[in-house]
Image: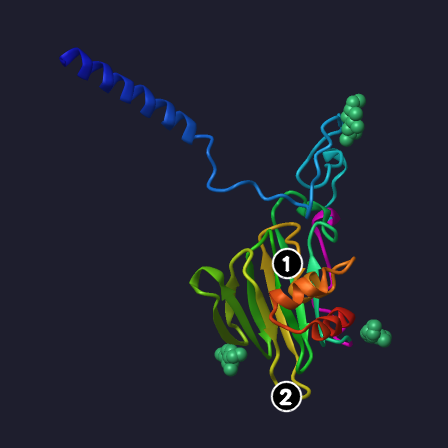
Amino acid sequence: MAANGKTSSMFFLIITASLLAMTRTIFAYDPSPLQDICVADLNSTAVRVNGLPCKDPSTVKADDFFFSGMDKPGNTTNPIKATFSPVNVRQVPGANTLGLTIARLDFAAGGFLPPHFHPRASEFLMVLKGSMEVGMVIPSQGYKLLNKTLNKGDAFVVPVGLVHYQRNKAAKGRSTVVFAALNSQNPGLTVLANSVFGATPEIDGGLLAEAFRLDEKTVQGLQAAF
Ligand SMILES: *[C@@H]1O[C@H](CO)[C@@H](O)[C@H](O)[C@H]1NC(C)=O
Ligand SMILES: *[C@@H]1O[C@H](CO)[C@@H](O)[C@H](O)[C@H]1NC(C)=O
Ligand SMILES: *[C@@H]1O[C@H](CO)[C@@H](O)[C@H](O)[C@H]1NC(C)=O
């Protein structure tokens, strides 16, 4: 019995030790992919990187890490009267692999960003001018809507993957400027209406009618609009 006890506690020690050794290489979550899809090419011998290949480090210059123009308003002459101007690795090559995107958002009066989500990033929003309502939906809480109206100097964080919208409810002439920071160099953008009603080729209208509890005619109208 005593020998048995000794054996099992030794076994327990070994298991604990190997589990501890394993935890050193376990991450809290998977590394974020930096592309929307990635079909494996099992034969490729090309270099694979999660991002873009790096240029020769001896050729880097300050301008690789620099961007000018965030003070310039985006063009809000469009159907949503709003614009999202990102500054990420495309504008600042030095940001490659750093997991960062910043952006300037401009809203004319009545401007809005329709319900959307970023599959690879959480988003911090800070109002620099005017005001903005931000709303987000928490699926695990019975699709509960949390919303808040932010004024100059107010900030709000939208967790990764949550559907959210932003709008400037202010009356005519009162534009809004927002600074945003996202923790991916390629946050991704999925606009719900476009994904559902604007897919090419179209998702079967009968299916959408059932899924959205609408009649097919309404669905066809929505599909034509997107
Ligand atoms: C990989 O190589 C095999 C055998 O040569 C070939 O049949 C297959 O099509 C290749 N796959 C891709 C994705 O190139
Ligand atoms: C803004 O966009 C509209 C529509 O695309 C265009 O007609 C207009 O010239 C643009 N304005 C500026 C200042 O670029
Ligand atoms: C939150 O959303 C509700 C429903 O859309 C709206 O009536 C309300 O004004 C919003 N609250 C804020 C603080 O923006």
Q: In this view, does 20 lie to the left or right of 165?
A: left
Quadrant containing ligand 2: bottom right
- Over which residues does the magenta segment extend? 63-77
- Please count the marks in the image: 2
How far separated are the C-alphas under marks 1 and 2? 28 Å
Q: Name the residue under label 1.
A: 102
Q: Where is residue 47 in the image (x, y as percent from the top left)?
A: 73, 30
Is most of the magenta stretch helix, strand or loop? loop
Q: Along the polypeptide, which appears first: circle 1 or circle 2?
A: 1
Q: 222 or 52, which is in the foreground?
A: 222
Percent x, y of residue 151: 53, 77
Is 34 in front, or is 196?
A: 196
Hey, which quadrant is residue 68 in on the image? Answer: bottom right
| Residue 171, disc | 2
Q: Which of marks 1 and 2 is in front?
A: 2
The spot of residue 87 in percent (x, y) is 69, 57
Seen in the picture, residue 129 relative to 18 is either above or below; the reply is below
Q: Residue 71 lies in magenta, yes or no?
A: yes
- Mark 1: amino acid: Ile
